[in-house]
Image (cartoon, rainbow, N blue to C red):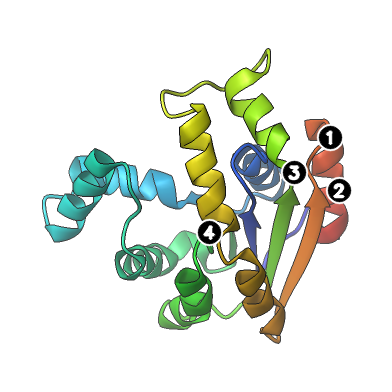
Amino acid sequence: MDLKSRIVVFIGPEGSDKTTMATMLSKQSRLPRITTGDIIRDLAKNDTGPLGEECRTMFAAKGYLSGESLLKILVQRFCQDDVTEGLILDGGMRTLQETRAFRSVLDQANLKLPLTVIHLQIPYWTSYLRLVFGKNARKRPDDTLSGVFGRLSKFHFQLHDRISVIQEQPDWELRSVNANKEIEEVYQEVLRWMI
């Protein structure tokens, strides 16, 4: 599959299989998969400067990195040679500030490519089944009722406004995918938007 010269961003609530979809698409397209979580974890572990310290503090407080710092991290990552022809971002545009600033991040990185946002949609109860209650639930230490509720609340906060910002961009497209199905079915629907 040739997805060159394109940026694909997966957004969706907890348990919507963003990582699974991004990984599958990355393998098939050979575009690099970038996840802000991995970058932040690496900085927390290996960066001795102020950004690494902010990442360590964020993990200790179980919070979010400031929008300004996150955008700085993305600019640094998007300037690397492996993304000049495109990339797949596993999660992003988590806040209204981040969504509004995303074009500036691309401009600063001189990454001028068409962008497709894939919005993986699932009902609230599916998040709880996949993460907390279900037979094959992920059950990370923070996959508790209150933990998942908090993360779902953060995702849905100002979601309509974030969607509006995405739709207003002239060379961006937004595609909604029903992710409340088997993984292969969801992936086939994602692929339909890529062709």
Q: Earlier in the sequence, mark 3 or mark 2?
A: 3
Q: Earlier in the sequence, mark 3 or mark 4?
A: 4
The image quadrant of residue 125 is: top right
Gap in Å between the C-alphas at discs 4 and 2?
20 Å
> Measuring 44% from the left and 66% from the top, which residue is drawn there?
78
Gap in Å between the C-alphas at discs 3 and 4?
17 Å
Gap in Å between the C-alphas at discs 2 and 1?
10 Å
Q: Nearer the viewer, mark 3 or mark 4?
A: 3
Q: Disc 4 on helix, strand or loop?
A: loop
Q: Disc 3 on helix, strand or loop?
A: loop
Task: Give the left or right position of residue 105, taking residue 47 as reference.
Answer: right
Task: Give the left or right position of residue 14, taking residue 25 as reference.
Answer: left
The answer to whether residue 10 shows anywhere in this view is yes
Decide: is 122 above or below 86: above
Q: Disc 2 on helix, strand or loop?
A: helix
Residue at the spot of label 4: 92
Picture coordinates of residue 150, whole percent (x, y): 48, 43
Label 1 packing within 10 angstroms: few (<14), some (14-19), many (20+): few
Residue at the spot of label 2: 189
- Tell me if label 2 and label 1 are in contact, CB under 8 Å: yes
